[in-house]
Image (cartoon, rainbow, N blue to C red):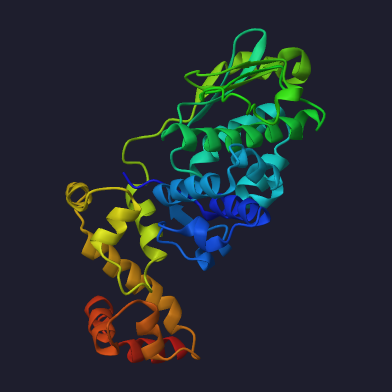
Amino acid sequence: MVEITRSRYAANFVSIAQQEGISVSKILLGSNLNESLLENHEGFIAIPQFSNIIRNSVSHTGNLNIGWYAAEATKMENYGDFGYSVIHKDTLFEKLKFFCEAAQSEYSEADFRVAADGKNILFVRKKIAGDLLEVRQIELYVLSMMIATVQDALGTGWAPDDISLQTFQIAGMNPPFCQNVTKIKFDQKETVIRIKCSDVCDSISLFRNNSSFISNREEDHGFISNLELLIQTQLSNPCLSLNLISEICDMQPRTLQRHLKKLDTSFVEIVSRQRFVASLDLLKNADTSIAEVSHALGFANQAHFSHAFRKRAGLSPMAYRRKEWI
């Protein structure tokens, strides 16, 4: 599977590491990313790249709670359309429902649900994939966002009395939110925030009538679109190849090839299509030469670009540009 996340989450980890005196190059080492890709917070990177950044951030800072601080440094309104929509939902029920349904647009492995047990509303992040270190940081980041979402409805003074965490308790390193929580369970199957119904009396009837809703995810949901987004970030890279994308996705090249074949496409076809789509936009800019467009899309030379473009468009890049100017 090709799993992706918005680059803003990685950028937030990098920002906290920088505040602790760690260079960006150290945090990005081994991720096949450059700093410019993180500047577009609406862009996407592969989750294995994000995982590498998490591990480097913890390793170089020694901060086992860096995921919490990375999230706390970012307000909900800074999460693009996702954050804007959460903020502008009228009720807690609507905020949580949207959060669960839209989270995968931010992080494709995200899997949330909300339920009610009679006494509490349960805001749940289902099992997080990864090693213990990675899970801890993602869980802390997610937990901060979950709490912020509830606080947006109930006020910033609200804090959960009861939390379940998937990660183990680390001796001498309690989560930074412990002082506001009376009960924390570690080593649980899911991350759960319990919201007392007494805190949200205006929403009880809504939750009782909607006792459980789950953000379902299909095995192949978004596979092609996720892959296309990752390829778009590498179009100018002369080393763009099946091996490079497979490495970024933490997959074997043959596994990726087989999966694409089942979907009646190929890696070569997807790259070709993405280069063509990108070229249409670049050619609209009269100040960009054909040679510059060719270079920006990773072609060996202008002749190769012209041949590939003509094959798809039925005319040369120059002819297409003249047609657009008419």
Q: Position of residue 71 (x, y in %)?
A: 65, 43
- Which residue lies at the image location 53% right of the left edge and 65% below the top edge? 35
Instruction: Count the numbered circles shown.
Output: 0
Whether residue 150 can be seen here: yes
Relative to residue 117, is residue 229 depicted above or below? below
Q: Position of residue 125 (x, y in %)?
A: 53, 28
Image quadrant occupied by the C terminus? bottom left
Q: Quadrant of residue 196?
A: top right
Quick check: 38 left or right of 220?
Answer: right
- Residue at the far top: name it: 118
Image quadrant occupied by the N terminus? top left
- Which residue lies at the image location 63% right of the left edge and 49% below the top edge? 79
Quick check: 69 left or right of 289?
Answer: right
Relative to residue 104, is residue 146 depicted above or below? above
- Which residue lies at the image location 63% right of the left edge and 26% below the top edge? 172
Q: Quadrant of residue 163?
A: top right
In front of the other: 118 or 148:
148
In front of the other: 115 or 130:
130
In front of the other: 275 or 185:
185
- Which residue lies at the image location 40% right of the left edge and 34% below the top edge? 217
Q: Position of residue 195 (x, y in %)?
A: 69, 19
Relative to residue 134, is residue 162 depicted above or below? above
Whether residue 110 can be seen here: no
Q: Position of residue 90 (x, y in %)?
A: 73, 34
